[in-house]
Image (tube, coloured by chain):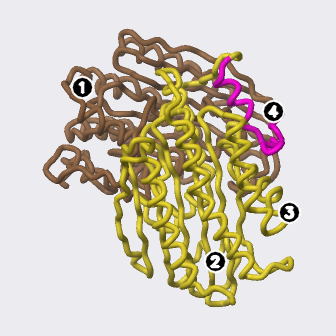
Chain colours: A yellow, B brown
């Protein structure tokens, strides 16, 4: 049976519940606070944010389901005929206290038009302040396992898509070690809507085990002032990506999306320093070397 | 006599020298450091940055003069025929330590094509962390005086242009108390090139007296932790404007401009907090009330 838009939205709502519960359990102290909001032209959402937990410093796990006449700029951008739209999804960004715990982002979403068009999109990507090759390998292996259940080409295709999407052209660096990204997955190329939906569900369900492992493994590692300062610089780059290059953010801000829900992705603090460059023999320098497209993280990241 | 492109670039270079000298004198401790850079396709610049002065925490006063074949995306954006371009200008952003001293931005620039088209652009705008109505009145009055020397319509026209340009649509607030902004000033509407150039020179020359007065008047005012935290939130909005809405920044990053020179405009630190709202009876709240288009600062800012 093909999933209906209401079934998809209901499942995303439960996903938000499960993810918040799972993260609170791993954090051990922080609790999500909820803001309910309504969209003037139809629909609304549940924005859930956390701050000053034990491991998580700032973040959000947002659900929304919005609908109404499709704004003209969306019609133009996506080359669609005028019709009503429906969009639902879960979107997550988490900034940990420790520079040894990576920032993570996850998004799963569904879009449909009354004219009949529909598609799924989403992705997960990891932004370590310090790259740990083993963590990166484990992260990508877990994503590959999810992808491999659905099609042999998914992981490589969506991994490359993430490399291209999460890229700061003006810095010539990737946002982090990438992950998977996909958009406008529809029932072409032999896939049914049911198959696409099951894949998106599997991505959403993979989030808590993937990130809880990274949090619990790394949050007790020691760090000092220098590592904290580097974290602030890397958070600055995260801001640059989200505000300059992230199509979702720009699109949301431009089409009158709920600003506070969209910008929950920004870190609690960020620093900028003119022409900051780590010395060549440092861990910071090694991390920069790993912020490149096309690295094969699963098979040992030889760079 | 009409100014040549070389005369304009030479004058801008001297303006950079004078502004750096004037700011160093007022700051009393900080000194600008210079990076010379060359553009692979022609021309280059002198990026001058300051950090941890007595009054100024971070900032830059940049000169550049670049030329070469006009990139396709510039031709498309400006609807120009293929030709070589020449562009020169001075660009300034200064972030003071004290939340009681406003952030300032100034830019003057000249652009010409071998096909014959040319224009001037520029502006000055002020971003107080706390609006002081008297300072805003004095700032706007000084700009009006400069404008009034050239045309009775300049101030109101360019003040409105600044209100529209320095606007964060997603926050429904202006970046600060505005100032003046102008672009593509050419020899239409009865103005000669010489007249436009003299106006641009007057704007550039007004910068040091305007900002030094604001620095020296305000940097000794007391402030505490709460004011510093508010400054960090306002600096976050400055980042949002520059990375999301500023056409100059986006254009520069998109067309392979020198990233470190463009992003010298970013503050040393910034904070983000989910749904931050100052209480109604506070100075912070009063400041937000003044971040609106169309306020008549010269005649007493009744809001």
Q: Compute the Cα span from label 3 to label 4.
A: 41 Å
Q: Which residue is mark 1?
A: B218
Q: Main secondary structure of the magenta part?
A: loop
- Give the residue at mark 4: B41
Q: Is residue A77 magenta?
A: no
Q: Name the secondary structure under disc 2.
A: helix
Q: Nearer the viewer, mark 2 or mark 3?
A: 3
Residue with the mark numbered 2: A75
Mark 1 chain: B
The one nearer the camera, B74 or B189, is: B74
**What is the secondary structure assignment of the residue under circle 4?**
loop
Q: Position of residue B46 (x, y in %)?
A: 63, 21
**In the rendered view, does A15 fall on the left or right side of A281?**
left
Q: Chain of mark 4?
A: B
**Which residue is identified by label 3?**
A153
Separation of residues labelled 3 and 1 (CA atoms):
62 Å
Query: Who's the residue at 49% across and 30% down the image?
Result: B92
Residue drawn at point x = 61 percent, y = 64 percent: A204
Across and down, in percent, residue B280 comes to 17, 53
Answer with the quarter of the image where residue B54 lies.
top left
Q: Are marks 1 and 2 on the same chain?
A: no
Q: Quick one: A137 or B161, which is closer to the camera? A: A137
Q: Earlier in the sequence, mark 2 or mark 3?
A: 2
């Amino acid at each position: 049976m093909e999933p209906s838009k209401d079934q998809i939205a209901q499942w995303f709502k439960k996903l938000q519940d499960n993810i918040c519960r799972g993260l609170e359990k791993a954090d051990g102290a922080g609790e999500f606070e909820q803001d309910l909001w309504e969209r003037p032209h139809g629909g609304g959402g549940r924005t859930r944010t956390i701050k000053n937990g034990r491991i998580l410093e700032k973040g959000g796990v947002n659900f929304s389901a919005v609908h109404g006449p499709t704004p003209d700029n969306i019609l133009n951008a996506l080359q669609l005929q005028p019709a009503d739209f429906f969009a639902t999804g879960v979107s997550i960004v988490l900034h940990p206290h420790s520079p040894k715990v990576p920032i993570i982002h996850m998004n799963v979403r569904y879009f449909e038009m009354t004219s009949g068009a529909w598609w799924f999109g989403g992705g997960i990507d990891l932004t370590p302040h310090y790259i740990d090759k083993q963590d990166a390998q484990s992260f990508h292996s877990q994503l590959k396992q999810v992808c491999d259940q659905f099609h042999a080409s998914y992981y490589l295709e969506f991994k490359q898509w993430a490399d291209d999407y999460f890229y700061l052209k003006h810095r010539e660096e990737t946002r982090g070690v990438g992950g998977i990204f996909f958009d406008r997955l529809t029932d072409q190329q032999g896939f049914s809507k049911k198959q696409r939906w099951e894949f998106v569900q599997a991505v959403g369900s993979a989030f808590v085990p993937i990130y809880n492992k990274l949090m619990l493994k790394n949050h007790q590692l020691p760090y000092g002032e220098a590592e904290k300062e580097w974290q602030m610089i890397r958070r600055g780059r995260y801001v640059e990506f989200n505000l300059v290059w992230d199509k979702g953010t720009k699109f949301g801000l431009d089409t009158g999306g709920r600003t506070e829900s969209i910008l929950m992705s920004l870190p609690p603090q960020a620093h900028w320093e003119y022409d900051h460059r780590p010395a060549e023999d440092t861990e910071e320098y090694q991390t920069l070397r790993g912020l490149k497209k096309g690295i094969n993280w699963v098979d040992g990241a030889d760079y």
